[in-house]
Amino acid sequence: MKHLKKIAVALVLFVAASSFVNAQSKVAHIDVQKLLADMPEMKAAESELKKLSETYQADIQASMTELQNKFRQYEGEAANMSKEENDKRAVELQGFQKSIGEAQQAAQQEIQKKQAELFGPISEKAKAAIEKVAAAQGFDYVIDAQAGGGLIVARGKDLLAEVKQELGF
């Protein structure tokens, strides 16, 4: 009888442990930044962005050189000009400097817009591939391996509704 109880307890513990193991979610991780960096599409997009940035930088640098040349010219001629003419030139230089600043901001916005345009589809492609591999290998969750990364795939049970019910809302 004692021996039968031990077998029954062992059987119950085995079934409980088996159920617990089967209830465990499968979790995987991936370094998304490394994946993206290794994608050929990303390298091409980065190259295109670099060219665009260099073009804008060259234009802005040319404007800055022109501004510096005008400043030196006006500074050299200031002694021979009237106060009104010097004031007019100072306003002109300030306006030119302001337009260069606006051009820098516009260039930065265009680069950001182009970056989103180029990187968006690449990121979506990577996410779709991660989801496909996770599903094929039976992973319920895939976590980004980077510090501060996040959850990429979540197929496990969401407890939100039950927890809200438990809290009374």
Image: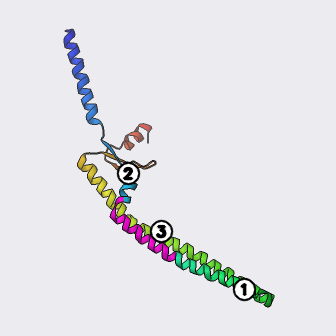
Residue type at mark 1 is Tyr
Residue type at mark 2 is Asp
Q: Which residues are magenta?
A: 38-56
In what quadrant of the picture does the C terminus appear? top left
At 30% from the left and 41% from the top, the residue drawn is 26
- Residue 91 on the magenta span: no
Give the color scheme: rainbow, by chain, secondary structure or one colour: rainbow
- What residue did someone put label 3 on? 112
As drawn, 38 above or below 27: below
Q: Position of residue 141 (x, y in %)?
A: 33, 46
Residue type at mark 3 is Gln
Image quadrant of residue 13? top left
At 23% from the left and 27% from the top, the residue drawn is 15
The numbered mark, 1 or 3, whose residue comes first in the sequence reads: 1
Q: Nearer the viewer, residue 125 or 76?
A: 76
In what quadrant of the picture does the N terminus appear? top left
Of the numbered discs in the image, which one, if any, rests on residue 74? 1
Q: Nearer the viewer, mark 3 or mark 2?
A: 2
Q: Nearer the viewer, residue 105 or 62?
A: 62
Q: Position of residue 105 (x, y in %)?
A: 56, 72
The numbered mark, 1 or 2, whose residue comes first in the sequence reads: 2
At 64% from the left and 81% from the top, the residue drawn is 67
Of the numbered discs in the image, which one, if any, rests on residue 31? 2
Q: Nearer the viewer, residue 128 or 58?
A: 58
- Residue 46 on the magenta span: yes
Q: Secondary structure at mark 1?
A: helix
* Mark 1 vs mark 2, CA separation in Å: 56 Å
* Mark 1 vs mark 3, CA separation in Å: 37 Å
